[in-house]
Amino acid sequence: MMMPTSEKCALTLALLTCVLLQGAQAGVVGDFNHVERCKDSLYMGTPPRGYLSNSFTRICQRYENKPRYVTLYDTHKHIPIYSAYTFKKSDGEKKVDFPWMFEPQLASEKSSSNMEPFPQSSNMHMNFEDTQAVLEDYADVVQYERGQLNPDEHQSDPLDKASTYSLTNVVPQIREFNMGPWAGHQDLIRKRLNNYCRGKAFVVTGVTTSGHTIRRNNLDRVAVPEYMWSAYCCIEFDQNAPYFVRYKFPVFAAYGMNDRVNNHMVEVPLKNLEKFLKGRMDVDKNFQIFYNDCVPDN
């Protein structure tokens, strides 16, 4: 039976759309240049630039078939180098009943593009522990907490909150730093953006490393960050905010040492943070966290 040309075209278009959509399914991606590959998590759709290492993997963090945020992941050190996300106005409540998840596509590109809860049987974890951290890595290290780069407290939708509980969004933080200066800074930024950001706020939070690692079974398993850093970009903000807040818009940053002592967070302009990081990371001279330093093009 001959098919009319219009039906042929419709069928071809449907197949093409299907192929394109399958190609846009995220997880491990080559770039973030598509909405389905987490482009909307980045200011001007542009990730931080200037990282020199080729061993990092780009993850569009998907949960329940929806892109949630971006992570640049080190599959050798088993930690995120940074996570980039959009801040959502929130009351700062932290959920504790979400399961910890892993990224199936780091282990096999044929796997699901959605993060998935760790299997109940720890024997199953061996299938993907070469490429990422697993629950056992954090089991017997009482001095460390799991520090989220995209924190639960900066999200409001329950599914967005749940998606922050991937171990690919987590680094080992010294307990005193995690519960003290780091928690304090995340809450400070939450309140500042809640109160004074009028549009969309983009946040990038990352790490530097110096060689310390969590070991398990005599193997280096998870790198321990030396410094934690974070920066936000919000170009639509309250112009009538008091000066002590207003000068920290549209963009500001901070860093702190992941340690028991001397671990206070230092707030600095974006350029100061980039200069600080250039001396501690493998980046080129054009290292830039936000496109055009979060200066609008108008």
Image: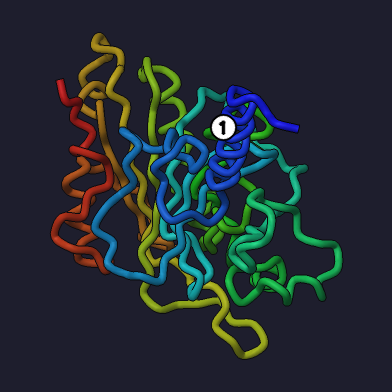
**Quarter location, residue 295:** top left
Q: Is residue 244 left or right of residue 109?
A: left
Q: Amino acid at mark 1?
A: Leu
Give the residue pinned by disc 1: 13
Position of the C terminus by quadrant: top left
Classify 262 as above or below 62. below
Camera-side residue: 277 or 241? 277
Camera-side residue: 126 or 16? 16
Residue drawn at (23%, 64%), measured in percent from left and top? 283
Q: Position of residue 87 (x, y in %)?
A: 47, 31
Camera-side residue: 128 or 243? 128
Residue 271 visible within the image: yes
Residue drawn at (54%, 83%), measured in percent from left and top? 220
Q: How many marks?
A: 1
Q: Position of residue 133 (x, y in %)?
A: 61, 68
Direction front: furthest residue: 1
Residue 183 visible within the image: no
Position of the N terminus by quadrant: top right
